[in-house]
Image (cartoon, rainbow, N blue to C red):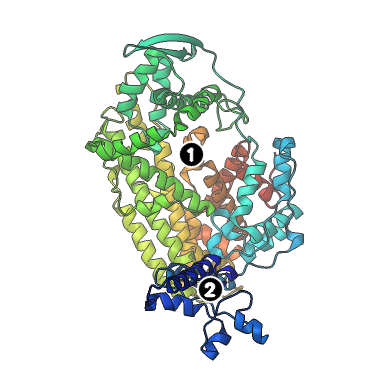
Amino acid sequence: MAAMRQPSQDTVSSAESADHGGRAASASGHHHHPTRARRNPIAAQACETCRARKTRCNETRPRCGLCERLDLRCVYREPRLTKKDKTAETLLAAVQRIDGKLDRILEAQQPPPWNEASETLTVPDPMLVDAAAGVQRQQQYRRPSHAPDESELRGALSVFPWPAVQALLVDGDGAATADLQGILAEGSGWLLRHEMLSGPAGALPCDSFLSGSNVHVVRADREQSRIVFPSLTPAIMDRYARAYFASYNLIYPVLDRESFIHGALPVVQRHGFAEGCLESLLALLVFALGALACEGVDGKPLAEGSGIRGGTAERPPALGIFNEARGRAGFVLGSCTLENAQAMMLMAIERAWDSHGIDMIRRVYWTCNVIESWYYLDLNLPRSDAVGFQDFIALPDFDDHRDFEGDPAIEKKYRYSFLSMVSLRRLIHRAFDELYGPGKTRTDGATIADQTLVIAELLHQLDGWRTMLPPELRWDDSARASYATVAADTEAATASSTAPSPVHVDILLAQLRCRYYYARFTILRPYLWRALHAPPGALALGPAAVLDGFVGAVDAMLQWPVAYEPVAGKKRLIPNMFAWSQSFLMFLLVLRVVRANKVLMALCEERLGEGRVEESVVVMVGWLRDTRRLDGVAEWAWRTLEGMYGLEE
């Protein structure tokens, strides 16, 4: 900045040369009258003394001739900028304005003072870091403590700030108290780090691959080097492909069955697999998930009575196939050359998408949107920019009706369930925003009556969603885990298939039903808080809406279908297992408080039926006992509940 205020040497030199040139012209007899444009730069360089005396300044530096002769201080003005030179001045003014705005923003958002005792970070030598050191480094790192508000606590963590739950944890062992302090300080970040550090399975091993032999084939008049895996026979590939489309793709329909069955599958069956080949990568991923689905239903349980079948806790089924796919992913995904990027752009611009291609893009987008929503709702993870397109991308219409070889019973459940899940997701987001978003009334506030109208409207919308479900998806609340019609449809679909593979529609419907009860619990949770923290004798005198809402919230926690057979016996096929585990932890904490309150427990037995609460407790505890072998959240939940429920290994 100071350099811009000093006269530049180029300006001084040009002025001096112009002055000497004018004198030379006068001496040679040329009567040249300098124009005003010539005199202005000369006058602009005169010192203050010469200006005051109105004498000509010879502009000698550091003192002109007159100041040297009179022994005076010689001061020159800063040169004025011409119109051409004002670009720098404009830029400088803009930078100064930006600096001022940044200063004001930073002053308004000063971070809390750093507490040296609350943060420890050691940086080891990168050459000496291994997996164990990485875990130790993560355990040493702690973010500065802060108190997250209610909008930052999701899933099981949302009930930890409740005084009734805190009293329950404090009365337990010291580990639960320490966990409580970490959760209240860090929120969902604590749970994420705990999951990464405490997961029993850890990272999948990379030392298991399929044995294969290299072959040379000719395709399109070109010889290619490919590999054949003897364990993946054409019949096995058919079986795994059908198992994938009957399980994982049923819940998340990202892959077009017809395109795969008649495209990539025949190629790898006939010619084997290749490096850097998208068809090979896609086929291996499908086979890995298909094998996992088969073993997850028919494999050996990890323990007696376990619903986790096949493989071990550290090595799931089909690990070798999955590692073959992972090894090839880099070649396919890493071809980021300029020509490749240009080709992709041109194809995106010029390709004439047919209606089915557009529908598949919609399926992929909305599948990613739904998965991302569960991470946001259950773990408070930030959402990607893709969510901004949801108002512009239409829902898929499943126009082909060929995913299950035209079986109408399965096709309708498959299609309607996905679309219903998308609309239910919107309603759950609306409930979070209206009841628990930043700046909204807290559930522990005294203005619970102000939320009554909002809760009533949200319940009305949820009931409307359920009323509009097609007959194929409807169920009776008294038989939440019953799939009588599903069994008949599945048998019919299996009988009509050329290669029998059970279609796991029960998992699809169980997930939809559980998410409905999750939404209902979310809406009624303020009433649950009010009932659990009401003074003795005051609850009966309170508004009837509070008691009704409390009973409705407890009812929404009971008998979740995903924890009951036959779905519970196929846990390897259930996506996002952590979401169910932490929901069950939340429910078990709340139900433990309810059971300790004789008035509330009697009310539940009277209006919900005797034994339903105890039955649900047994089922949810059984889920955590089983999934703790694979799920770090379930392991933490088991340890948290161990003392208060008297759990045993």
Q: Indicate the position of residue 124 as horizontal and vertical percent values.
A: 75, 43
The C terminus, quarter of image:
top right
- Tell me which residue sits at (33%, 41%) in the image: 363
* Tally of numbered tags: 2
Residue pointed to by mark 1: 575
- Tell me which residue sits at (56%, 63%) in the image: 600
**Which quarter of the picture shows residue 236?**
top left
Residue closest to the eye, 15 or 228: 15
Q: CA distance from mark 2 to mark 1?
A: 50 Å
Residue closest to the eye, 514 or 184: 184
In the image, residue 429 sits, relative to residue 649, either above or below, namely below
Q: Is residue 602 left or right of residue 398?
A: right
Residue closest to the eye, 344 or 397: 344
The amino acid pointed to by label 1 is Pro
Residue pointed to by mark 2: 100
In the image, residue 477 sits, relative to residue 551, either above or below, namely above
Q: Residue furthest bottom?
A: 53
In the image, residue 603 sits, relative to residue 176, either above or below, namely below
Q: Is residue 398 left or right of residue 526?
A: left
The amino acid pointed to by label 2 is Gly
* Secondary element at image label 1: loop
